[in-house]
Amino acid sequence: MAQQSSVNPAQLVNLGQQNLAGDKRALYLKLFSGEMFKGFQHNTIARDLVTKRTLKNGKSLQFIYTGRMTSEFHTPGNSILGNSEGAPPVAEKTITIDDLLISSAFVYELDETLAHYELRGEISKKIGYALAEKYDRLIFRAIAKGARIASPVAATNFAEPGGTQVAVGTAEADAYNSAKLIGAFYDAAAALDEKGVSTDGRVAVLNPRQYYELIQAVGSNGLVNRDAQGTALQSGNGIIEIAGIKIYKSMNIPFFGNYGVKYGGAVTTPGNTGDFIGSDTALEDGGGVAGMNNNYGEQNAFDSTCGLVFQREAAGVVEAIGPQVQVTSGDVSVLYQGDVILGRMAMGADFLNPAACVELYAGSSAPAAFGATYPANAS
């Protein structure tokens, strides 16, 4: 039989107890693990997939379109003074800088002193994510806009190709059908070929669910990727290519009126999805949103959109101030006993070459072109 202790538990000194009451471990140090659970980090990809220009000493940037020309046989003795139509026709596209886009946080100096983890670096990263998310969303909307319109060069007998819309199916469930997606990709590639769009820099952006459906179809449905099998196939990162179109995944594409995914029907929510999924009313520009100087469309304009296929010339991004972080110091820090960490950028986006824009949709009819009532320069 084990020996019994004669010490009264009530007489033990509980070094972790506060004022001899409550939790006996309350005063013990809560060790920091060295990690912070980051919020969802959006994959920001659009900036490197389209045409980007830096703007200085101006509010907008002009892009010039030139149409095609015709050829003819020369009649001996006739002078050659240029074609009678005055071709090529020329048109312009103007992309205006939106107002300054910012994301900021105030860091109180006392809180920073007491905290046993580093705050500023983490806050700076989160500010960067916020700006990058908006950046991608604006560009993807601009590409969808371009897919719905005719070319700016539309002179008689010299009309250039315009945007393309390809139906994946008639219901939301069709947007996740790998066979129908593959068929839509080949249709999109053929349309780009027929409209004279370069094969260099062709890409597509789908939502994650669609992307993983395609990965599972590798080796079947005519989809073969001999360069990425086994472990590479399972990594799920930029390995799928259809008809020369490299495919990316993003939670920032317009998708059935939401962003990235729309739960219900074909897709069951995993639960606890957070607030980043859903509509972004900050991009609703009907009637004029303060600071928005380009037409990015209404949220309901994308109720049947389910993917984008495009080439680098599809859209343009004009930057007056690239993404950067600023921190207050000196007298300001003394006055407020803390610092403001500010992320900022000044950019604008719009379509450039509609022929390089393809919108995938699932519905009974193709999405209509954006209204041009706001802003004045929208086309």
Image (cartoon, helix red, strand yellow):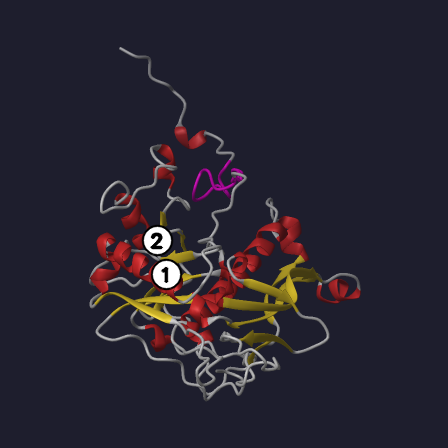
- Which residue is at 51% across, 85% downward? 375
Which amino acid lies under the numbered mark 1 shown in the image of this protein? Gly
Q: Which of 164 and 50 lies nearest the eye of the viewer?
A: 164
In the rendered image, the vertical position of residue 227 relative to residue 168, given as above or below: above
89 displayed left or right of 240: right
317 displayed left or right of 303: right
Q: Residues within 10 Å of mark 1 (few under 14, many from 20)?
A: many
Residues at marks 2 and 1, CA–CA distance in whole angstroms: 8 Å
Q: Which of 37 and 210 lies nearest the eye of the viewer?
A: 210
In the rendered image, the vertical position of residue 295 relative to residue 106, given as above or below: below
| Residue 311: image location, x then y, percent | 46, 61
Marks 2 and 1: CB-CB under 8 Å?
Answer: yes
Choose top left, top right, bottom left or bottom right for residue 148: bottom left
- Residue 46 visible in the snapshot: yes
| Residue 235: image location, x then y, percent | 38, 39
98 displayed left or right of 165: right
Q: Tell me the SS state at disc 2.
A: helix
Which amino acid lies under the numbered mark 2 shown in the image of this protein? Pro
In the rendered image, the vertical position of residue 34 relative to residue 357, given as above or below: above
| Residue 102: image location, x then y, percent | 59, 68
Q: Tell me the SS state at disc 1.
A: loop
Q: Residues within 10 Å of mark 2 (few under 14, many from 20)?
A: some
Query: Label 2 belongs to which residue?
Result: 208
User: What's the magenta region?
Assistant: 16-32
Query: Label 1 belongs to which residue?
Result: 260
Choose top left, top right, bottom left or bottom right for residue 340: bottom right
Label at residue 304: none
- Name of the residue lying farthest toward the front: 77
Is residue 203 one of those drawn in magenta?
no
- Residue 275 visible in the snapshot: no
